[in-house]
Structure formats: C-alpha cells, structure tokens
Image (cartoon, helix red, strand yellow):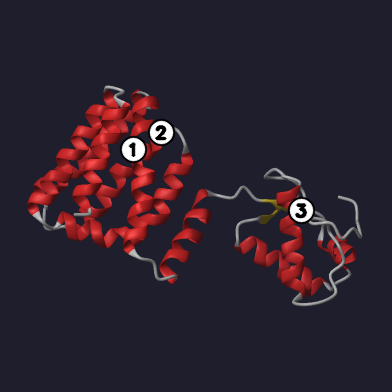
Amino acid sequence: MAPTHSSQPGSFAQVRSGRLADLVAEAMLERVVGEQLEPGHRLPAERELCEQFDVSRTVVREAIRSLAARGIVESRPGSGLVVAAVPSAVVRDALGLYLSRRPTDPQATREVRRLLEVQSARLAAERADAEALALLEQAHEAMAELARVAPEETEQLGHADLAFHRALAAATGNHLFVVLLDAISTPLLELRVAHLGVPRLRERALRSHGELVARVGAHDASGAARVMREHLADVNS
C-alpha cells in the first residue's frame, strides 16, 4: 500500500488535528471498507503508518488497538497487521449493546421481531434441507422435553425457545437472519421467560413450534408464515 497524501475519503491522508488516534483509526477503517479489503489482507507496518499519517508510533499503536478491539484488524505472527475476518458476534454484540443502553419501546422490538421471524419461517419452509429440518426438530424436542421434566426452569426454557427460533432462522440459509435475531434476543428474553412461566401459554408455544416444524418439513411457505404470525400474536397478547 503506497503512501498517499490524498484527501479523498478512505485514503491514508496525514492527520494533524483533533484526537489523532481516533482520526487515524477512522481513516484506516475507511480504507478497509472503501477498498473492500479481504480478511487476511496485509496492512502497512507501524513505521510506514507513522510516515503516512505523520504521527508518532504511540498514536498509531493506539489507533491499531482501537481497531483490534472492534474486530477490524489483528496482528498475526509472521504476517504483521492484517484485516480481520469480522465474526458475526461483533455485529450481534454491538447492536445488543445499543439496545441495552438506549431506552427502546418494547413494541418497537416486537415489530422488528415480527418482520424478521415471519420472513424467516417463510424462507425456511422454502429452503430447508434435511439437515436443517433435523436441527429444527431437535430444538423443538429439546424444549418440549425440558418443559415436561422441569417446567419451573423458566429461564432455561427461555433459552430453549430462543434456540428453536435460531434453528428456524438458520434454516433459511441466510446467516444474517441469525445475527439479527441474536441481537434482539436479549431485550426479549425476559418476555420469553414470563410467557413460558404460564402453563397454558407454554403449551400453546410448544404447539406452535410443532406446527412450524410440520410446515417447514412440508415446504409450506405460506403456512409457515401464517403459523409464525399467529404464534407471535399469541406471545405478545
């Protein structure tokens, strides 16, 4: 990566004002995103970055630490500084933190969940292969067994319920459904636990899950979407 003094977005321009480390970090991030650098792409060494930005090594190291903490870059023995493969957990945790720190109307979260999960059910029914269907069935059976032997363990039931919905999202073949579902799951966990603590509501939830498994197995997309809409309406009632 050749040194440049261009002021265009995404370039490694010299940084002379403001919080230097933050500005250096943002300029590096713009380069990674703007040039669509692949995971493993080697970035300039500290010394070269110092020259490109005309800043001290301390500033560069602080910028690198900031980007590493965000999962953007990583240091590899023998390779130096490289673009990291950003794991889905980074996105999940960032959005989860945003939701936990920003007061949000529960209805807003439920609206997003409805859009996400109804479409997940539809696509899962269209796309699920034998392996995805087996995992969905296992998640349903695990929750049903837990409800049978330990119905008082409502927190565990809440996590088992989430595992079923994650398996359904995974059955779409689109990993973004799982990432987004994970991100909104924490704010909804208390609602799940409270709902599953009521025997008649718990039984209705399990019945809905069983119907979803059947509709996905039959590749009935419209039926799966309908069952999910009814299930969520029941949960939110």
Location of mark 2 (residue): 172
Residue 134 x %, y %: 29, 29
Q: Earlier in the sequence, mark 3 or mark 2?
A: 3
Q: Residue at horizontal 16%, vertical 54%?
A: 196
Question: Which quadrant of the rendered structure holds the C terminus?
Answer: bottom left
Q: Amino acid at mark 3?
A: Arg
User: Which of these two is toward me, 221 or 171?
Assistant: 221
**Residue 102 relative to residue 192: left or right:** right
Q: Crowding at label 1, few (<14), some or many (≥20) Cα neighbours within 10 Å?
A: many
Q: Earlier in the sequence, mark 3 or mark 1?
A: 3
Location of mark 1 (residue): 168
Q: Is the Cβ of the residue at disc 3 closer than 8 Å to that at disc 2?
A: no
Q: CA distance from mark 2 to mark 1?
A: 7 Å
Q: Residue at horizontal 43%, vertical 43%?
A: 177
Q: Quadrant of residue 203?
A: top left
Q: Quadrant of residue 59?
A: bottom right
Under tag 3, what secondary structure? helix
Q: CA distance from mark 3 to mark 1?
A: 36 Å
Location of mark 3 (residue): 31
Label drawn at residue 48:
none
**Residue 44 relative to residue 114: left or right:** right
Q: Amino acid at mark 2?
A: Thr
Q: Residue at horizontal 76%, vertical 53%?
A: 31
Q: Amino acid at mark 1?
A: Leu
Q: Examine the rendering and report whether any part of residue 155 can be seen.
A: no
Under tag 2, what secondary structure? loop
Residue 18 vertical position relative to residue 165 in the rendered view, above or below: below
Q: Crowding at label 2, few (<14), some or many (≥20) Cα neighbours within 10 Å?
A: many
Q: Is the Cβ of the residue at disc 2 closer than 8 Å to that at disc 1?
A: yes
Q: CA distance from mark 3 to mark 2?
A: 33 Å
Residue 135 vertical position relative to residue 12 in the rendered view, above or below: above
Residue 135 vertical position relative to residue 84 in the rendered view, above or below: above
